[in-house]
């Protein structure tokens, strides 16, 4: 493992470590010499001073310097509380052995140092040649439990792995006063007591994403403290991916009064029949029995239904203005309003898709175009999962505009010159409370 230090911190590391360690060693030597010459009081005081200095190095100087290190490796080492206690015991035995010259203490010290070396080497071997992977659904909705299946493959030829923890490293964007920074967080995935040689182990967990959005994944962290728990070693395995969490559509029963004419118009059109035959296809469980074509059914020996062309009234355009409103609103309050608006947009497009309408979602930088069916619905939900508040002026391109239009905006006048104000139903973010 390579460790690089910045110049100032390198000097501080060298000075602090050299002074404290040198003083502790000098005090221990003075105690040993004083003990051999019969000056037992001086030997006792020197041993106490050496022990105090060693404890200062262990408990104050080294942890403070370790936090300033810049690790340039996929491996990292962490010393838990049990390791700190073990290290204190090693230092204590070292000081006592040097000050007294007792051979039994030297044997105990050798056993302790051998235990430390075995602990470091075995933990490193335990996490080598392990390959984790994770499977999760392609479509995830906020607030719903999702099953993650974690697989850990042991590629070693002669050694199984014991007591392995696997974490998923996700990247989150944090907004500061000056800039936005990316921080990484480790999410616990699974624990494997044993991974056999040239085999794999699987584990399933359930996760719930409270908010919609895109969660970039940087990789995995494999962690183990086997066999003694005095040292924990971690290994980072890069695996770039992303988890897209869709906003959760909700029923429109409580907010139907915001667009009564629009919902009624679409529902009335869905109960009627078009005038032109579009196609004849195989019957689905969701089809109405009035649309069954009995002649085609008799010819093909399969239940067939007629599809009719959709008229313009079956088309719904949902425009989402992500700009902040004209009235000054606190950032947390606007963020809450924005999330409610995103959820309402997802509910709208899902409602109209289920009614059989052609739906189009228009954002400041994306246009889904008209479409229907589950695949088009998921495409629009993916756009809503990635949307963030912005100041970009939306440009409403009306070359596809037809049918009903719904505009969600925080602006008091969200309509632009290019939008059709007579056929657009405007809903403001604060109305969704």
Image (tube, rainbow, N blue to C red):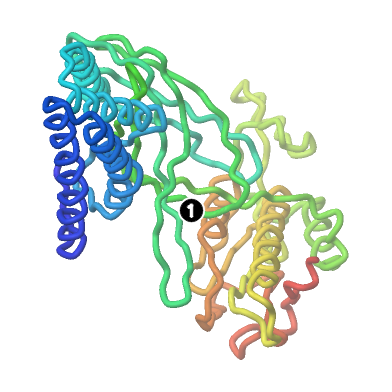
Read off the residue under disc 1: 214
In the displayed structure image, the side of residue 254 where residue 321 appears, left or right: left
SS state under label 1: strand
Residue furthest front in the image:
38
Q: Position of residue 364 (x, y in %)?
A: 52, 74
Q: Position of residue 286 (x, y in %)?
A: 72, 35
| Residue 128 shows in this picture | no
Q: Nearer the viewer, residue 170 or 34?
A: 34
Image quarter (top left, top right, bottom left or bottom right) of the N terminus: top left
Q: Is residue 141 above or below residue 428?
A: above
Q: Say few, some or many: other residues with alpha carbon within 10 Å of mark 1 (under 14 / 14 to 19 / 20 or more).
A: some
x then y, percent, for residue 225: 35, 24
327 left or right of 163 in image: right
Q: Is residue 309 visible?
A: yes
Identity of the residue drawn at 26% across and 9% down: 197
- Residue at the image position 26 percent from the left and 30 percent from the top: 91
Q: Position of residue 53 (x, y in %)?
A: 28, 43
Nearer to the camera, 105 or 324: 105
Residue beneath the point at 24% across and 25% down: 96
In the image, residue 113 sits, relative to residue 29, either above or below, namely: above
Q: Quadrant of residue 411?
A: bottom right
Quadrant of image for the C terminus: bottom right
Residue at (53% x, 64% y) in the render: 387
The image quarter containing residue 130 is: top left
């Amino acid at each position: 493992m390579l460790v690089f230090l910045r110049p100032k911190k390198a000097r501080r590391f060298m000075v602090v470590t050299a002074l404290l360690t040198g003083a502790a060693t000098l005090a221990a030597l003075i105690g040993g010499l004083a003990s051999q010459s019969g000056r037992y009081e001086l030997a006792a005081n020197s041993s106490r001073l050496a022990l105090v200095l060693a404890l200062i190095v262990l408990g104050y100087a080294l942890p403070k310097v370790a936090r300033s290190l810049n690790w340039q490796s996929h491996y990292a080492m962490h010393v838990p509380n049990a390791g700190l206690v073990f290290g204190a015991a090693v230092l204590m035995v070292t000081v006592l052995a040097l000050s007294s010259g007792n051979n039994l203490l030297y044997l105990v010290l050798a056993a302790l140092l051998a235990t430390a070396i075995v602990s470091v080497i075995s933990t490193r071997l335990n996490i080598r040649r392990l390959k984790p992977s994770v499977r999760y659904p392609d479509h995830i909705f906020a607030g719903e439990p999702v099953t993650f299946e974690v697989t850990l493959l042991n590629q070693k030829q002669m050694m199984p792995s014991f007591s392995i923890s696997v974490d998923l490293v996700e990247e989150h964007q944090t907004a500061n006063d000056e800039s936005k920074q990316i921080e990484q967080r480790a999410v616990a995935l699974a624990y494997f007591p044993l991974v056999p040689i040239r085999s794999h182990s699987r584990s399933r967990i359930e996760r719930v994403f409270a908010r919609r959005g895109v969660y970039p994944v940087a990789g995995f962290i494999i962690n183990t403290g086997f066999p003694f728990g005095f040292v924990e070693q971690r290994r980072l395995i890069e695996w770039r991916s992303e988890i897209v969490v869709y906003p959760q559509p909700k029923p429109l029963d409580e907010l139907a009064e915001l667009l009564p004419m629009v919902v009624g118009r679409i529902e009335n059109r869905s109960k009627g029949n078009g005038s032109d035959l579009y196609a004849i296809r195989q019957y689905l469980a969701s089809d109405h029995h009035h649309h069954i074509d009995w002649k085609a059914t008799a010819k093909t020996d399969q239940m067939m239904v007629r599809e009719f062309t959709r008229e313009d009234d079956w088309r719904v355009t949902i425009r989402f203005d992500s700009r902040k409103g004209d009235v000054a609103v606190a950032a947390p309050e606007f963020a809450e309003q924005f999330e409610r608006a995103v959820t309402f947009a997802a509910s709208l497009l899902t409602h109209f898709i289920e009614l059989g309408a052609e739906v189009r979602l228009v954002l400041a930088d994306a246009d889904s175009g008209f479409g229907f069916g589950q695949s088009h619905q998921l495409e629009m939900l993916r756009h809503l999962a990635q949307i963030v508040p912005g100041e970009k002026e939306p440009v409403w391109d009306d070359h596809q505009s037809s049918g009903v239009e719904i505009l969600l905006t925080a602006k008091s006048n969200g309509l632009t010159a290019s939008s059709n104000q007579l056929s657009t139903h405007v809903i403001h973010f604060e109305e969704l409370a």
